[in-house]
Amino acid sequence: MRDKPARLRLFALIASVALVVAGCSGSSDGGGGSGPIVIGTSLPLTGQFSQPGGEAKRGYEIWRDKVNATGGLLGRQIDLRVTDDASSQDTIIADYTKLITQDRVDLLLGSFSSLLNYAASAVAERNQMLYVEPAGGAPNMFTRGFKMLFFTQPATAPHHADGITAWIKSLPEAQRPKTAAFMTQDDPFTRPAIESLQQQLEAAGLRTVYSEIYPANTTNFQPIVAQIAAQQPDIVAQGAQFEDGIGAVRALRQVGFSPKILFQTNAPGNGNQYSSGVGENATEGVFYSTSWSETAATPLNGEFVAEYRKRFNAPPTEDAADAFAAGQVLQAAVTNVGKIDQVALADWLRANEVPTILGPLKWAANGEPQSTFMLAQWQKGKVEVVSPKEAATTQNIVFPKPAWP
């Protein structure tokens, strides 16, 4: 959680922005223009969230090119404007303000992380601009009474780890873990995800032997991991973004402690960047929750996967898929409304389900998604979906996690 001065500074900055941009809003030209439809976004291409931010950019660009190659949006080509917010709340507020008031973009797409989207969505809301975000599932995103915000993943942070809880509870009593250790980055998404998981597992009878919240800039995980190893928990759960997830695995390997179950948020979903970071032979058995599967028979998923592999010579990542899906959601709203009317677009999304490469998405009145994440596991150097059964790509589950090589 941000400290009080940081929150006050953020609110003050948003308020000052509101005075400057009051009365400004995006185009409502009904799609009758002949020029391109300009879509603006600010992404963390540098700084703390640069890895997933770069993947979101890839997903947006593949979506844009797919739409433009098939006739555009409302018969017009898409001009995607991407700026770098440097993983800074202050910068992202300035970026979206400029996109709206100076660049006069027609539509907006969201950024990466709850931390950044919390600030950016407030700018969009004050200007009555639709804000479709591919990341940003912290619960405080949806308690502000916003009408223009829509999160294009299956569920919010408190439900992120529901799948691992369900699997643990399904194990025979003799195999079920008895003790658990929790560590999480001090982040608006990872904290509620891990705090909810801890509550669920304690309610299921597991005993917590360690729980720690570490600063977002933590790079040395040896002290944390040493304390965890001393307790020998059956399950270790980490609320990680990317680099901290890799750092924790490296530290666990260095101290020689391999829990029966290792669950991490976000980090394992970064494909070969994750496996390269921890070592492919160290990924075996790692669990995480995912919004997307490379093998899913969902609308345009095959095309997305093929194009990503063609451009980048690597397996697609979940963050890129989430961004592509955000584009699909925006496209569905504009196509069905038939014009760029911000309020009408938001009303349409609240009332309809949208097919995406993540599967069908629908929302509550506050923009909170109403579905569930899948449970995934690294097996033999690749990701397999292990639940729910209808989405599973394998019936095998690696348990217990093998010792580090």
Image (tube, rainbow, N blue to C red):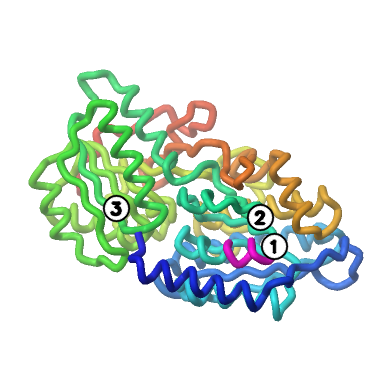
> Would you name the residue on which mark 2 appears?
148
- Amino acid type, label 1: Met
Residue 61: tell me if it is visible.
no
> Would you name the residue on which mark 3 appears?
184
Residue at position x 17%, y 45% in the image: 210
- The residue mark sitting in front, 2 or 3, is 2
Residue 129, numbered label: 1
The span shown in magenta is 121-129
Specify whether residue 123 is painted magenta.
yes
| Image location of residue 157, percent across then percent down | 44, 46
Residue 297: tell me if it is visible.
yes
Distance, label 1 to label 2, CA atoms, is: 6 Å
Residue at position x 35%, y 59% in the image: 1
As drawn, 272 above or below 296: below
- The residue mark sitting in front, 1 or 3, is 1
As drawn, 109 above or below 90: above
Q: In this rendered view, identify the residue nearer to me: 383 or 160.
A: 160
- Dot 1 and dot 2 residues touching (CB under 8 Å): yes
- Amino acid type, label 2: Met
Q: Which numbered disc flags the more N-terminal residue, 1 or 2?
A: 1
Residue at position x 86%, y 73% in the image: 35
Q: Which numbered disc flags the more N-terminal residue, 2 or 3?
A: 2
Judging from the image, what secondary structure is the residue with disc 3 in?
Answer: strand
